[in-house]
């Protein structure tokens, strides 16, 4: 699985990752911060998780809290809100829809 596949993944069916092709084509070149600034917070969280850099998650949290009326206290809570916990193992196929 490539970074772009994980960042724009909308779900899984067994060992197949389902990727949003429209978002992939439009935003695949953006950095983690740029994704967050574009309002693509789920994708930004996924990008930060892919990088493995905790400071990127903190950056997404800061951008998120600047743009919402209900601030989030931690990166764990932010990950839970967007349903992301890490890069899955065992993905063998990518389907772009």
Image: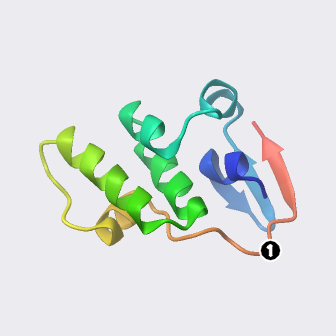
Q: How is the image coloured?
A: rainbow
Looking at the rendered structure, the secondary structure element under dot 1 is loop
User: Which is more toward the observer, 38 or 52?
Assistant: 52
User: Which is more toward the observer, 64 or 21?
Assistant: 64
* Among the 4 quarters of the image, the one containing residue 78: bottom left
* Among the 4 quarters of the image, the one containing residue 81: bottom left
In the displayed structure, does residue 25 sit left or right of residue 76?
right
Marker count (numbered): 1
Residue 54 place in picture, x, y as percent: 42, 67
Residue extending farthest to the left is 69
Q: Residue at x 87, y 57 (%)?
A: 93
- The quadrant of the picture occupied by the N terminus is bottom right
Residue 38 place in picture, x, y as percent: 41, 30
User: Which is more toward the observer, 42 or 29?
Assistant: 29
Residue under label 1, please give it: 90
Residue 61 place in picture, x, y as percent: 30, 54
Residue extending farthest to the bottom is 89
* Among the 4 quarters of the image, the one containing residue 80: bottom left
Q: Residue at x 61, y 49 (%)?
A: 7
In the displayed structure, does residue 11 sit left or right of residue 81?
right
Residue 42 place in picture, x, y as percent: 46, 49
Up-down relation of residue 10 to residue 30 (above or below): below
Q: Residue at x 67, y 71 (%)?
A: 88
Up-down relation of residue 57 to residue 39 (above or below): below
In the displayed structure, does residue 66 sit left or right of residue 15?
left
Crowd band around label 1 with a 10 angstrom C-alpha radius: few (<14), some (14–19), many (20+): few
- The quadrant of the picture occupied by the C terminus is top right
Q: Residue at x 66, y 27 (%)?
A: 22
């Amino acid at each position: 699985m490539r970074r772009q596949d994980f960042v724009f993944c909308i779900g899984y069916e067994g060992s197949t990752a389902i990727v949003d092709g429209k978002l992939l084509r439009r935003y695949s070149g953006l950095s983690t911060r740029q994704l967050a600034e574009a309002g693509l917070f789920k994708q930004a969280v996924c990008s930060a998780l892919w990088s493995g850099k905790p400071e990127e998650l903190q950056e997404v949290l800061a951008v998120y809290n600047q743009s919402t009326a209900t601030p989030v206290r931690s990166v764990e809570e932010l990950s839970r809100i967007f349903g992301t916990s890490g890069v899955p193992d065992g993905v063998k196929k990518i389907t772009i829809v």
